[in-house]
Each structure stands twice: as structure tokens, then as C-alpha cells.
Amino acid sequence: MASISTPSFLGSLSVFPSQDETTHIGTSFPDKSVQLSQILRAPNSDELIKDLAILTSQRCVVWFRDQDLTIEDQRELGRRMGELSGKPKTSTLHKHPVSENTPELGGDILVISSVSGISRVGVRDDIRASNGWHADITFEPVPSDYAILKMHTLPPVGGDTLWASGYEAYDRLSPAFRKFLEGLTAVHDGNYFIDYAKTQGIEIQDNRGSPENIGTTNLTAVHPVIRTNPVTGFKSIFVNRSFTTRIVELTPDESDNVLQYLYRHIAENHDLQVRFKWNKNDIAIWDNRSAFHTATNDYEGHREGNRVVSIGEKPFFDPNSKSRREALGIRV
Ligand SMILES: O=C(O)CCC(=O)C(=O)O
Ligand SMILES: [Fe+2]
């Protein structure tokens, strides 16, 4: 398959040194003099943050090295990226259903930790590392647009994170299979968090960043299998192994087989993935509408970071939208 490298949209961020880490996914700002805290306070901060949202949506994930961003700044960035790129006014920051165990940081910060908390909950079996591929909180009726993760504690070796492009995964399917998937919807189920909350004796958080993300007894939602990203206009596959359990319009057997195919398609095409090696205080920002990610549990020792997940729009499929390759003129 021919692939032509297309320069990323940088807009006002082009004043900072950056590099695309692979052809299809991931752009980094390797110079630690580029600080998100300064971008937040720049005179043209609205323009810079909007362009950061567009870049993140186009490239699926971006990284900044050795950041001094505080927790409060991380929340502000999470809020403004979505607001400046057009999300509904009713969408704010997500409060994870089982975030009660981190009260010192507030319900809208999720601690990603090797020591405690949810980051290893719900891995259904650990024989294959690829079982961990997911997009965050897709069991919510109004799921996430962006996530911002800052890692402050790392093991001596290991613990990389991988991301995969849902746009490129869509573009690799045959036209007939794309068309078949475009009419379908799928159930996303996060009820294992309810079971986890029971075992930990904690309450499920209600009012989770949108008037529609309410209720504590049934964490499920139905979303289109192919979703249009409103920031880029590109189509993406929107099912993931951690939460998607069933394609509604198919028989259970058909659904299982189609979902398994799509999960393998995402996990086994390493040319639509990128792997990031963390250093202390690095930040990753990704678009949960069009990218999947997975941690690597290959390390010993303490690994911990803080994550802000913002709520975007209700997922939709626009039949007039284009695929990324179509829109950018990349040969399929
Ligand atoms: O620990 C990681 O590398 C990623 C964890 C994760 O899935 C997340 O922060 O959403
Ligand atoms: Fe995640």
C-alpha cells in the first residue's frame, strides 16, 4: 500500500519545534522549552489551544516533554481544548464512576497508578497484552473528546503506552466492509466498574460531565460503529475491546466475529500504531473519538500519573463525511 507523508496541521503551533513520530499517528514537541503552562497564558492562548485541539484530532495523539503544568492547569487545558473546538456547552470534565478514591485531587482527576485504583480493572484476561486496547469511558452516553495524562512517577524500565489510529484502521477496510459497518450501532458496557465499586466499598459517581451521563446502576450506551470526528470531519472506527460488547443489528455470533475482526485489525496493524517511552513529567494528549490506546504492563515498581478526561459531543455518523485518506489526498 502506498503511503504518502502529509504534513500535519500545526497552525499557530508552528512556532514550536515538532515532529511527526510515524506516518499515520503521533506528533511530539520534543523541546522541553515548549511548556503547556505558557501556552495557557500566552496572549493568543485561545488560538494556540484551538490549534492544539485540531492537531490532536488530526494526529490522534501529541506529546510534550518535562512539563510544569499543575493539576489546575491540566483541568483548564482539558476544558478549553473542547470548548475552543466547538463541543456542546453542557459538556465539562468527566468524573470517573470510580474516582472517589482520589478525593484529594477532586473527582475530575483520575489517578493512573500501578499501586491502586482502576487502571488494571477490567482487563478481561492477561494472556495477550493486546487485550488492553481501548478508548476511554465509551460506556457514557456522551463520551470523551480529549484526554490529558501527565506521568510523574515511572519505573526504571518499561511501562510504555501505545496508541492506534481509528482513522487509518477505517481506511484499511474494503469499501464494501466500510459501507456495511456504517449502518451499525454497538453497545458499550462499563458495568464492571459497578462490580469493582462493590468490592472496594465505594460509591459510583453520578453526574459525570454531561446532563446525559447520569445514573449509577447501568453504565452502558449505544454508539455508531463508525463515527465522524467533528473537529477533523474524518470517519473512524469506534468500537473497542474494553467496553464494546455487542453490535446491535447483528446476531450474537455475527457480532462476536465482526468485533473480534475489528479488534485484531486495530491491534495487529503496527503501522497504524505508535509507542511512547515516558520520562518524568511528560504529557500525552489524545483524541478519544478516533484513537485507541493501551498501557504496557511489563514493569516492576511504581508508575503513576494524573489524567483529565473531558466530555465531548454525543457520537454521530455523518454519511457525507470523508475518510482521512480521502480528505488528505493520501492514496488508498
Ligand atoms: O497507563 C497508561 O499508559 C495509560 C492508562 C490509560 O488507559 C489512560 O490513562 O487512559
Ligand atoms: Fe485509557
Image: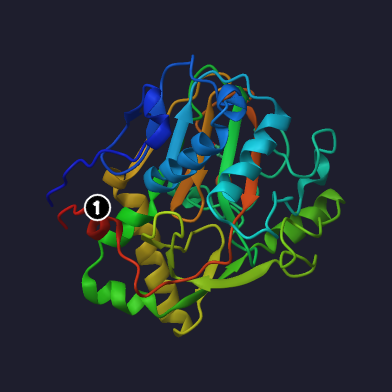
Could you tell me if residue 186 is visible in this image? yes
Q: Residue 214, percent across and down?
A: 77, 66
Q: Residue 283, percent across and down?
A: 54, 29
User: Is 28 situated left or right of 304 in this image?
Assistant: left
Residue that badge 1 annotates? 328
Could you tell me if residue 112 is visible in this image? no
Q: Which of the colour schemes (rainbow, by chain, secondary structure, one colour) is used?
A: rainbow
- Which quadrant, please, contains the C terminus? bottom left
Q: Residue 27, percent across and down?
A: 37, 34
Q: Residue 119, percent across and down?
A: 64, 42
User: Is 217 situated left or right of 51 in this image?
Assistant: right
Residue drawn at (34%, 42%), measured in percent from left and top? Answer: 25
User: Is 37 situated left or right of 230 in this image?
Assistant: right
The answer to which of 226 and 123 lies nearer the viewer is: 226
The answer to which of 183 and 77 lies nearer the viewer is: 77
Q: Secondary structure at mark 1?
A: helix
